[in-house]
Amino acid sequence: MVRYLPVLILVTVFAAPALAQDIPQLELGFGYGNFAMEDLTPGRHHGFTTHQTINVHPVFAIENYLGFYGFGRDPVLGKMEVITEIIGGKVSYRNLGPVIYGSAGIGGGFLRLPEFGTGESGFGFKYGGGIDIPFKEFFAVKIDVSKMAFGFLPNEPRSGGLNVSAAIVIKMGQ
């Protein structure tokens, strides 16, 4: 019992401010992403993205970004897909109505080559910013522009480029 008491106190300290805020505790965004990795394959490629945000303070939040991008067919490698998973921090300015934010995070990516039955994972990062435009009490439209890069190939520089995503955000716990 004694060893659980510090954990209970720690949870209470961090949970109490989240319960008293006027902003949503959790925001889930689902939408479309458009990503260019010119080092790996030419052109821009699209896919599905999600943003999961836990607001711990009106200014600071923890954000998780998950993306699945189809990179088309390469004549040699066949079908190519990239899965991204980035977790990091988000700083927001909420006084204008629309929420303007900047975010940065680290994580990883997985380059899939399904026709070969193989793939390559690599450490990655993401930084950028965007805007959340509210259109109902519990909904918003998110536009996010960020730079993402991954180290898929050993002894090669990171492959990356500009990522533009748009999503519908569901606000919970307001």
Image: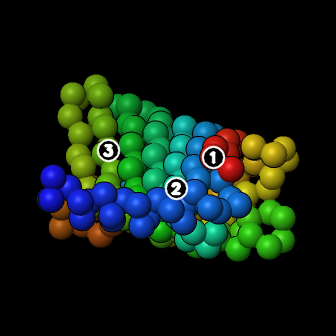
| Residue toward you, 136 or 122 | 136
Residue annotated with mark 2:
54
Amino acid at dot 2:
Ile
- Could you say whether the residue bearing mark 1 is in a helix, strand or loop? loop
Residue annotated with mark 1:
173
The label nearer to you, 1 versus 2, is 1
Residue 111: image tag:
3
Position of residue 17 measured from the top left corner of the image (x, y, whole percent): 54, 66
Earlier in the chain: of badge 1 and badge 2, it is 2
Position of residue 2 measured from the top left corner of the image (x, y, whole percent): 15, 59
- Could you say whether the residue bearing mark 2 is in a helix, strand or loop? strand
Give the class, few, some or many, for how many residues have Cα within 10 Å of label 3's Cα (few <14, many ≥20): many
Earlier in the chain: of badge 1 and badge 3, it is 3
Position of residue 106 measured from the top left corner of the image (x, y, whole percent): 36, 64
| Residue toward you, 123 or 160 | 123
Give the residue furthest to the front. 1
Q: Is 98 situated above or below 110? A: below
Instruction: Kindly indicate the quadrant of the structure image that contains residue 74.
Output: top left
Answer left or right for 1 relative to 34: left
